[in-house]
Image: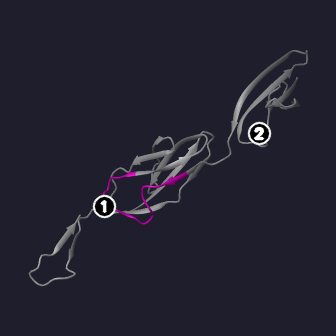
Amino acid sequence: ASVKISVDSGALTTATTSDSFANWTFDTSALSDDSHIILANVTDNLGHFATSSVTITVDTTNPSVTLDSQTDGSTITSNHFTISGTASDTNLDHVTVTIDGGTPIATTLSANSWSVDSGTLSDGSHSILATAYDTAGNSASTSAIHVTVNTAASISLDRSSGSIGDTVGVTGT
């Protein structure tokens, strides 16, 4: 049996067959990122002929992803907040967020924007990392950012001017 293949209506070339059943392989590494039609023609030893085609998508490009809602080194005064950002890829599939190296959390993805609830975090330092995946299995991650959750109440007295007995401004959280 022999197998001839054509890519994107190109010339037929002989495929490498691996056994007497005409199982064959085709190396897609030379194909560009895009959709391609692969046509296979097989002829057995008695001259019987069959043809079949399949459309494949070659995607070797990693998606891009940003984490926009918090900045590295920031302090957050709530232990429950929204983490969000953007991601893009022709074949974008999903985005996950990992907090403190834990289990990845699925995000809500709408167009190229994603978001997820942080869950309840304890006071202290936390690392946040976002990873985008495309349908071909390519992925890319942000650099981890570090935020400090500080929910403790604070009071600040403004006594920059005035005399004893004057009213003093007090602010707090």
Q: Is residue 61 above or below residue 22?
A: below
Q: How is the image coloured?
A: one colour
**Residue picked out by circle 2:** 28
* Mark 1 element type: loop
Q: Nearer the viewer, mark 1 or mark 2?
A: 1
Name which residue type carries label 1.
Answer: Thr
- The spot of residue 15 in percent (x, y) is 85, 32
Residue drawn at the location 54% of the way across and 51% of the way down: 65
Magenta extent: 65-82
Please tell me whether residue 79 belongs to the stretch shown in magenta.
yes
Does the segment drawn in magenta span residue 20? Answer: no
Asked if residue 109 shows in the view, the reply is yes
Who's the residue at 72% across and 27% down the image?
A: 54
Circle nearer the N terminus (1, 2): 2
Q: Which residue is mark 1?
A: 77
**Image coords of residue 171 (percent x, y):** 21, 68
The amino acid pointed to by label 2 is Thr
